[in-house]
Image (cartoon, rainbow, N blue to C red):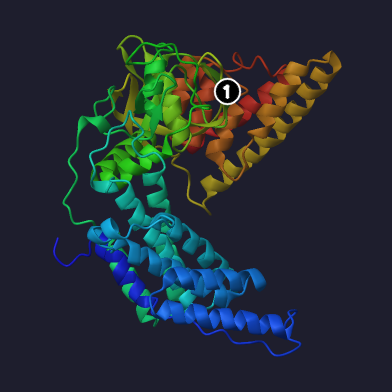
Amino acid sequence: MAGEASPTELSSELLEDVEDVEDFVEAKEGESSLSSERIRHVSDLMKIGNQAFRENRFEEAINCYSRANSVKPGDPVILSNRCAAYLRICQFLRHRPPSVSEYSPLSGLDPTIHAELALKDAEKVMNFRDDSTKSYILKASALIMVIVLSCISTPIILIDSVITTNGYFVKWSLNAYLEKYELARDVILSGLHVDPTSDPLKDLERTTASTIGSRGHGKPERTDDFDCTVCLKLLYEPVTTPCGHTFCRSCLFQSMDRGNRCPLCRTVLFISPRTCAISFTLNNIIKKTFPEEYDERKLENESLTNPGGDFMPLFVMDVVLPCQKLHLNIFEPRYRLMVRRVMEGNHRMGMVIPVSRTGSIADFACEVEITECEPLPDGRFFLELESRRRFRVLRDWDQDGYRVAEIEWVRDISPNAGTTQREDLQEVINAAAEFAQSWMKTAREEAQQRQDRARLLELDELESMMPTTRDPELYSFWVSMFISSYYSYKTEAIRKIGTPSRKRYESEDKQGTRLPEIRSPNLRNSITKLIVNASWLV
């Protein structure tokens, strides 16, 4: 692409900013721990080195700077000048014609080694001079020189090369390339924060962005080397198995829900989602090479793990009311897949009961939140759930074996604040709360007398879910936990959209006959009376 510098031209452009070296200023007597004689010796070495640098005798300059550094180690001027000399000799060796080498071969260090040494010196200079733009220029130039020389010594032109997934073609080079490029960009931007008007840093930023950021060789061609052999799509969050095959993480474990073998070679695998790591190197390569396709795969995956506020994955089993805790043991492959996706998202799903006579599901259900998820060694999940709020199922469909529904949330139609009906309802709720607390106290005393630990834990769990009386809807559901556990009652109660109407149903449906946990007849009758008293509010 016209107007962009090639890697060969990049080093010469970026080193235009390293034009000259600094002169060494002798410290006054008493300001340095060195004797005046040694200070003069360092000064003489620096003068000889600077003269050699300006006459393009870079090896001699490096030798002088190194000798000066051995006498006065850690001096920022010495390190800065030696860093510049290393960068210049890299440029000189890279542009040396092959014909010259035929008659005068070189026996020194490789240019890549010089670039690495320049980077070490630049990092030391940064520690002493983090407020100097030249320090940032030297470090960024050294990083980019390492990148350029790596591109040439390893014919990988990186992003533009044809790459295969089973050879780990990248090795060290590509990963280091990506890391050093990002680091160089950070260094340049940090330098611009120190001096936003620095023209050398601005030029360096533009040059690196145009040369490395957008290579100009066109969009790389997609091959099936990057496709998952299970879903036949671009690999997303790739995982490499011990047998050497690579799959999308979700595809691999969806396959392992039905058997612990590699989908390709059928080797037995002893891995789990908790112990199997994503291949970040391969994932970064795919992300850099095919950004558009990667973004599409990311959106597709997010739509499965976070379906949105109007969509809900469904676990078809039982009726659940708000303010309820329960435990589940998930063993079916389809629901194991659903649980993994839910745990990657907002930890929420819906629970609904099937309707046997129609073969479908109930039209009302309840949202539950997974508060604890314990993966078991055999692939099952042990879940602790807390129910949250109700919803109506508008339509549902199958997705990868489990149901997903489009929903709308359901709330009670409560009397307006300040009205007589609202005040009467609040009185009923407050009275019910007093009776419920009294019953909880009586039940706890009886359990303690019998030393029934299971019953005490059940009461603690029930009390922990008790909502405030300022929310009549949730409190009515919590009170209903005392009354019944039958499907027919719960299914009808979850439909009611008015707290008084639900309480009237609770009393009229099986008045007094579904209160097995309330052993005191007087207390049971009192709660039933309270429920009946609320019926006129409908």
- The answer to whether 258 is drawn above or below residue 490 in the figure is above
Which residue does the image show at 50% across and 77% down from the upper left? 49
Question: Most extreme residue toward the front, as rendered?
Answer: 103
Asked if residue 315 can be seen in this view, the reply is no
Q: Which residue is mark 1?
A: 326
Which residue does the image show at 38% across and 61% down from the upper left? 145
Relative to the observer, which residue lies in front, 387 or 29?
29
**Dot 1, crowdedness within 10 Å: few (<14), some or many (≥20)?**
few
- The answer to whether 157 is drawn above or below residue 370 in the figure is below
- Residue 458 lies left or right of residue 93; in this view the side is right
Relative to the observer, which residue lies in front, 524 or 144?
144
Which residue does the image show at 40% across and 27% down from the upper left? 240
Could you say whether the residue bearing mark 1 is in a helix, strand or loop?
strand
Question: Most extreme residue toward the left, as rendered?
Answer: 2
Residue 364 x/y as whole percent: 39, 27
- Residue 451 lies left or right of residue 290; in this view the side is right
Quick one: quadrant of the N terminus?
Answer: bottom left
- The answer to whether 154 is drawn above or below residue 303 in the figure is below
- Residue 82 lies left or right of residue 158; in this view the side is right
